[in-house]
Amino acid sequence: MNMPASQKPPLALIAGPTASGKSALALKLAEAAGGTIVNADSAQVYRDLAIVSARPTAEEEARVPHALYGYRDGGEICSAADWAADARTVITAAHAAGRLPVLVGGTGLYIRTLIDGIAPVPDIDTGVRAAVRALSVAEAHEALGREDPEAAARIRSSDTTRTAREAYTRCLRAFETRSVESRMAVDAFNTALATACTAEKTAYHDAVVRRETATRATRATAEQSATEELNDALTNSRERFEMAMAPE
């Protein structure tokens, strides 16, 4: 259930273009209101980009609590959904501590995702990502034109990000189609294998029954023959004994 705006805990948002004084204003506000500054800049989440992204200095970070600055490795992917989940955790902790979360940054997608949410997006297969990244922008745009002419016409050939994103999407769809086809082929193979195994088991069972039947018949014949031979031997022995005991 959505909480009425009047009952929601406070949160300050400072957003704007690069070098517009956002960080300095956030620091003043956090000091005055007992706040925790929460980074909403997609570059400043990476510890490797402290200088390039104009991350707050160690002295500035020591003046008030800062969160989500330099907490990710440069080789790690941080999507808007990833950051929003981390931001919610930090904001909840700040409210629990009685502090004002001061959200500051210029990445609009991060902020919109935090406020409005975002549709779930599946992770991109590493093989697909590597294949697309191996292409130049021109090659990726050309490949996109073959797969989706409308999308290629809508996106400038120099637009690296959108071209790659659309190429990822098309590759994922092709990958999913191949996966479905592969699963169908595997299912068909398993069905055929089960059918063949069932037939083989039936044939094996029949062979065993025939062998056991033949064995029983052979055994019965052998037993009858042995019994007859034994009876003959006993008859002969009895006759010889009687002849030997007969008076002269």
Image (cartoon, grey):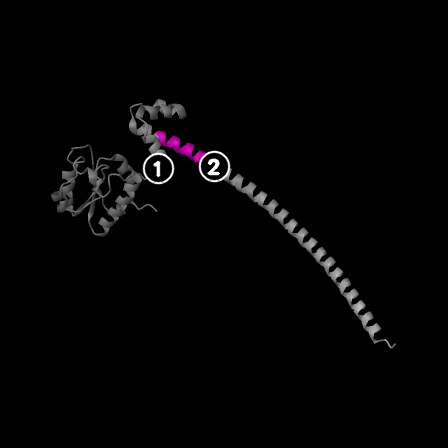
Q: Is residue 212 magenta?
A: no
- Picture coordinates of residue 190 (x, y %)? 53, 42
Which segment did they paint magenta?
166-180
Of all residues, the one furthest to the left in this rendering is 59
Question: Residue 121 lies in what quarter of the image?
Answer: top left
- Side (left or right) of 8 relative to 66: right
Which amino acid type is shown beneath numbered disc 2? Ser
- Picture coordinates of residue 6 (x, y %)? 26, 45
Q: Residue visible at 35% across and 37% down? A: 126
Question: Residue 247 lies in what quarter of the image?
Answer: bottom right
Most common secondary structure along the magenta stretch:
helix
Name the secondary structure under disc 1: helix
Is residue 13 visible to the viewer in this orientation of the structure? Answer: no
Q: Residue visible at 40% across and 26% down? A: 147
Name the secondary structure under disc 2: helix
Compute the Cα span from label 2 to label 1: 19 Å
How crowded pointer 1 is (Cα within 10 Å; few <14, some 14-19, many 20+) is rated as few
- Picture coordinates of residue 170 (x, y %)? 39, 30
Which amino acid type is shown beneath numbered disc 1? Thr
Of all residues, the one furthest to the front in this rendering is 248
Question: Residue 80 lies in what quarter of the image?
Answer: top left
As drawn, 212 above or below 10 = below
As drawn, 138 above or below 1 = above
* Figure quadrant of the C terminus: bottom right
Q: How many marks?
A: 2
As drawn, 105 above or below 137 = below
**Residue 126 tag number:** 1
Q: Is residue 173 magenta?
A: yes
Q: Earlier in the sequence, mark 2 or mark 1?
A: 1
**Residue 182 tag number:** 2
Is residue 142 visible to the viewer in this orientation of the structure? Answer: yes
- Picture coordinates of residue 48 (x, y %)? 20, 39
